[in-house]
Image (tube, rainbow, N blue to C red):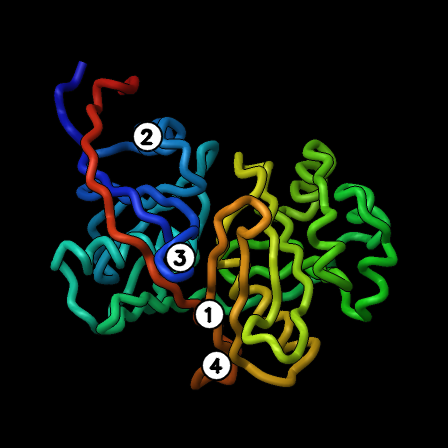
Amino acid sequence: MMDRFVEFYHLNAFVAQGQGGNPAGVVRHADMLDDAQMQAIATDFGYPETAFICHSEHADVRLRFFTPTNEVAFCGHATVATFSALWQLGELEAGDYTQETGAGVLQVSILASGKVNFETAIPVISDGPNEKVIADAFHIDSKDILSTGLPVKVVSAGGPNIILPLASLDALARMSQDREAVIALTEAYNCIGVHAFALSPHESDITACCRNFAPAVGVDEEAATGSAAAALAAYLTEYQGTHNRFVFEQGEHIGARSLLSAVVKVDAQGHHRAWVGGEANTLARRGYRLDAISA
């Protein structure tokens, strides 16, 4: 048995006026951990994602992201939590950084206010499931989807999500997932989850209200999903094209209102790149004994 401690922090990312947000664990000095230990710690913590900070030969840090059930290539809210934690600890100042992830080496910036903005992988759009099939999985009418005039698509910006447009905030509120059907659907399309949205009235500062369901990776509904916000921003740029700056609200339906900003930029190679930003609350520091898990 080992008698070592893991240093970790808890933060909520994408908070709205300091409240709500999505919880994440952040583990420092994680190079001493193997894959099984990282997964066991993430499972024990039970946060939607836990980030493990490792040394990188290619970037300022290497981050590995684990849900309660498996490792994922990238996680937006855990990115915000990690860089906010390092900023709050005084290890990073406001400025520009890079992170090595399973989705590539990506840029991150920390503003003087502590807000974290991060780049995602180049968004890729592909065909999604039939409207009737996905409507049945969420106990809504396919008309709630078809009347938007927008397609159901799979969009990956570091983690693939099914982007599901809904005609009204009422339809968004009425969603109730058939968990097994949603798992089957996301696995069939090799996706992490389903990101549903309804556009807000034009006079609102909020572009769209969202809900994200990822039961296949142990997250029935998530309060804020950074990679899915990037995917939605790319989707709206592609299918509406009226603007490239967005503010998304998420988590209200589970009592954890969150705000995510997003912008779509064109890089030097002509590719659309999505950036997502948000704030985290004050970190909480905890200790964890490695002998609490099996080595």
Q: Amino acid at mark 4?
A: Lys
Give the CA distance from mark 2 to mark 1. Answer: 30 Å
| Marked residue nearer the N-terminal end (3 or 1) | 3
Q: For the residue labelled by badge 3, is the local secondary structure a helix, a strand or a loop?
A: loop
Residue that appears at 52% across and 65% down:
230
Local crowd size for mark 2, using a 10 Å CA cut-off: few (<14), some (14–19), many (≥20): many
Q: Which residue is mark 1?
A: 261
The answer to whether 22 appears left or right of 222 in the picture is left
Residue that appears at 32% across and 66% down:
116
Q: Which residue is mark 4?
A: 265
The answer to whether 287 appears left or right of 294 in the picture is left
Q: For the residue labelled by badge 1, is the local secondary structure a helix, a strand or a loop?
A: strand
Q: Which residue is mark 3?
A: 15
Local crowd size for mark 4, using a 10 Å CA cut-off: few (<14), some (14–19), many (≥20): some
Mark 1 or 4: the one toward you: 1
Give the CA distance from mark 1 to mark 4. Answer: 13 Å
